[in-house]
Image: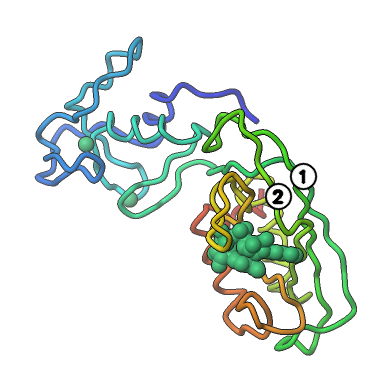
Amino acid sequence: RTAAQKPEEVIKKYMEEVRVIPDEDCMICMERLSCPSGYDSPEGGSQALQPSTVGKFTKCGHTLHMLCMLAMYNNGNKDGSLQCPSCKTIYGEKTGTQPKGKMEIYSIPQSLPGHPDCGTIQIIYNIPPGIQGPEHPNPGQPYTCRGFPRFCFLPDNDKGRKVLELLKVAWTRRLIFTVGTSNTTGEPDTVVWNEIHHKTEMMSNVSGHGYPDPNYLDNVLAELAAQGVNEDCLKR
Ligand code: NAD
Ligand code: ZN
Ligand code: ZN
């Protein structure tokens, strides 16, 4: 990972200060933008960000108190990326908190229901149990790993292979799994899927996580894009 940037520098990289304050509320603190942010300047921080400083995101143009955005950034995993709280546009490379593990790719010469003209890509994720880091809900406590290795399936056609390449990017950015409470089992401090749906059933769809599902590839492309993983990531 790249050397940690100072939080204020991350804010200033993706937001510019506005002189004419819009007559709107701040999405984070819900105060009028013309009133100061409820957040104080951090100890030892540069004097450039005052509670009254209003910033505008460079791409989407949404406006917020810059100190409110700084507080939100400092509350997250401080990976050098920002996400606009209004429209969810991602600035920089969003990374997650997925624990260490392995992603393996295999080819299966059998077709998936709904994709009769091609074979199948099998992804195997394996994550061993470990101790939570500072980015996890209970640092220093163990986390469990249920149902690993997890087997996932994609059609081995152009779109399926594109999804695979984007999933590899998401894996490298630690976005596929996270540590938290499982919705299915209620177990806390365990490794769970994180916002990017996978198909874990190959020849049936009893769980809803199987085939056929004609919308799956488009849906997962949209979920990847919502995490900042899109075609642009494959061009670099
Ligand atoms: P969760 O229950 O917290 O749900 C997180 C997301 O995963 C949700 O979006 C949910 O829709 C999705 N999800 C739930 N069940 C899924 C499944 N079977 N396949 C694909 N996606 C699923 O997530 P979790 O706790 O990580 O997983 C859900 C359950 O599925 C767990 O009990 C896990 O052990 C089990 N599972 C078992 C195997 C296995 O090979 N035994 C494989 C995958 C998942
Ligand atoms: Zn605010
Ligand atoms: Zn925005």
The image position of residue 6, as x and y in percent, is 46, 21
Residues at badges 1 and 2 in contact (C-beta under 8 Å)?
yes
User: Mark 2 packing: few (<14 Cα in 10 Å), some, or many (20+)?
Assistant: some
Image coords of residue 39 (percent x, y): 24, 27
Residue 7 found in image quarter: top left
Dividing the image into four quarters, tell me where ligand 1 lies.
bottom right
For mark 1, does the 10 Å Cα neighbourhood hold few (<14), some (14 to 19), or many (20 or more) residues? some
* Image height of 113 relative to 3, above or below: below
Residue 222 vs residue 102, the one in the foreground = 102
Q: Is residue 203 left or right of residue 138?
A: right
**SS at circle 1:** loop
The residue that label 2 is drawn on is 145
- Determine which quarter of the picture holds residue 166: bottom right
Question: Considering only order in the chain, which callout, 2 or 1, is on the residue closer to the N terminus?
Answer: 1
Secondary structure at numbered mark 2: loop
Q: Can residue 198 be seen in this view?
A: no
Q: Which residue is drawn at 73% across and 42% down?
A: 129
Q: Residue at x 78, y 52 (%)?
A: 126
- Residue 232 rendering spot, x and y as whole percentages: 59, 55
Residue 13 in the image: state x and y as whole percent: 41, 31
Residue beneath label 1, please?
A: 128
- Amino acid at pointer 2: Cys
